[in-house]
Amino acid sequence: MGDSQVTVENRKKGKGVVKYTTWTAEESNELLKFLVDAANRGWRDSNGAFTKATIEKKILPVLNATLGCERNILNYKSRWKWFKDRY
């Protein structure tokens, strides 16, 4: 699939059609860079995790502005789970 974004329609049981855009390799790499930077700045909570507020106010706006995309907290959670599955 390469680095191009693909919009996919997915039918979920009882939820109708859900549209989402796949993450590109560039977006994933930039998100990881921003997360490492945020960790180095001490933006994590006492558990070592990032709060929803930190993601929505400090990380996603920079990611969206840098790459010209429109990622939200649900997109972030999906990609975070994807990263964890591969770790």
Image: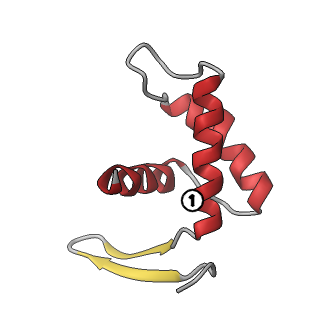
Identify which residue is drawn at 42% across, 49% down: 80
Instruction: Give residue 29's position: percent from left, percent from top.
Output: 61, 57
Is 13 on the left or on the right of 22, as rendered? left
Q: Residue furthest left?
A: 13
Q: Residue furthest bottom?
A: 1
Residue 26, picture quadrant? bottom right
Q: How many marks?
A: 1
Is 77 on the left or on the right of 27, as rendered? left
Is 7 on the left or on the right of 38, as rendered? left
Relative height, residue 20 to residue 4 (above, below): above
Instruction: Give residue 76's position: percent from left, percent from top.
Output: 50, 51
Residue at numbered disc 1: 28
Identify which residue is drawn at 59% across, 22% down: 43
Instruction: Give residue 34's position: percent from left, percent from top.
Output: 65, 42
Residue 71, picture quadrant? bottom right
Q: Determine whether the residue tagged by mark 1 lies in a helix, strand or loop.
A: helix
The residue lying toward the viewer, choosing from 55 and 49, is 49
* Residue 70 visible within the image: yes
Which amino acid, by three-letter code, is at mark 1? Ser
